[in-house]
Image: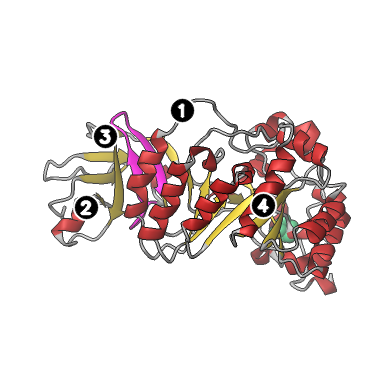
Amino acid sequence: MLTLSGSALETGLTAPALFRLTTVPDLPAPLRAQRAFLMRGLGDVPEGYPHYLVFDRDPIPANGAAFTRLDEKFAYLSDDDIVHLSPHGHVRTLFRSASNHNSILLTEQCNNYCLMCSQPPKRKDDRWIVDEVRQLVPMMPRTTKSLGITGGEPTLFGDDFLDIIRLCKSWLPTTALHVLSNGRSFADVGFARNYAAVDHPALTVGIPVYSDDPSRHDYVVQEKGAFDETIRGILNLKRFGQRVEIRVVVHKQTFERLPELAEFIARNLVFVDHVALMGLEMMGFTRANLDALWIDPIEYRDELSAAVAVLRAYRIPVSVYNHQLCLINPDVGIAYVKSISDWKNEYVPECDGCARRDECGGFFSSGVKHGYSPSIKPFPHRHPAVD
Ligand code: SF4
């Protein structure tokens, strides 16, 4: 697992700053102003960069420029990555150019309180993040393929949230944008209309629906009436022609009615653009509510098969995320996606020698740490039919 935030060994910064990194010594002078030069070992130190990053025991820049020294946890940093550095030595990696899993956390506040929230909500005012994001987006490479916007609940920032979408449209016009939202704000027709009016060319909002039974959904998100608002939000978004993905996290509270939920989606929300059936991540509240949530995926593999079959029968695009290939029925393979973000993806010793490891998404690092299915079984052959 990559370390995305931590402490520097030392820093000469006197004020917090965002830097896009480069190892190119001869960038045109105007481009150097917002970049930090990433030094590796000895070598000439190019002039004109406002900051320099050095590693471990590397020599400091001989030109006397301000520098921050990082340990090898940050050795993955490379050209066009973007970091936030504080004068107290706190380092946060906000963007990695080599990754297809970059996302912006817009707020830690949320109006749901989901049993399995991986980013437990905080009540404090964190609108300062919006200002940071206004700085961050224009620094990202225009070639960025995809970008997520998450929270908390990012739509709680209302017009500021819409401004960020507009900013992404202006600076990253070819970047696919994926917003994660509980969908409740879109129950307000005016807000849904304003969101649509941004007219972003490649924008999808992913909205969780946990059950066809409103009381079960409300229990999972710990908010009475949430189901009604979420469904109204989805309907408003589709009314305005917006792309919507439904996301279902499968766990002990949701697996039994998975086929019924698929039927509900097929009958009432057949126009959604995608449904993602997702395995549980052992982060945040999940760890505290493990007894109420954890179920071995092998135990719900038939429900998963049934849900995939229903959605496919109605021609609704469906994907299965965050599962291990050896724990699903072969008929789910057609919807299986290797999905776990690269920076938190691992395999376990049982995977050694598995013939299909390169097709398998493996585990969240948190899952490896806090327990996983005893039924993990390496495939002896590449094709499941011969196993
Ligand atoms: S044994 Fe193979 S299929 Fe199972 S989790 Fe490991 S790599 Fe994936």
Q: Secondary structure at mark 1?
A: loop
**Residue with the mark numbered 4:** 234
- Label 4: state its secondary structure: helix
Residue 354: x percent and y percent?
72, 63
Picture residue at 46% right of the left edge, 27% below the top: 125
Q: Disc number at residue 11?
A: 3
What's the CA distance linking mark 3 and mark 4? 47 Å
The correct choice, above or below, for 299 with respect to 286 in the image is below
Task: Where is residue 324? Give x, y as percent.
Answer: 73, 56
Q: CA distance from mark 2 to mark 3?
A: 19 Å
Mark whose residue sits in front, 1 or 3: 1
Query: For this view, does 59 lie left or right of residue 185?
Result: left
Q: Residue at x 84, y 43 (%)?
A: 213
Q: Which residue is mark 1?
A: 125
**Sooner in the amino-acid sequence: mark 1 or mark 4:** 1
Q: Which residues are magenta?
A: 77-94
Dividing the image into four quarters, tell me where ligand 1 lies. Answer: bottom right
Name of the residue lying farthest toward the front: 190
Does residue 281 sit above or below 334 in this rendering?
above
Q: How far, Cα to Cα, is label 1 from label 4?
A: 27 Å
Between the residue at mark 2 and the residue at mark 4, the CA separation in whole angstroms equals 56 Å
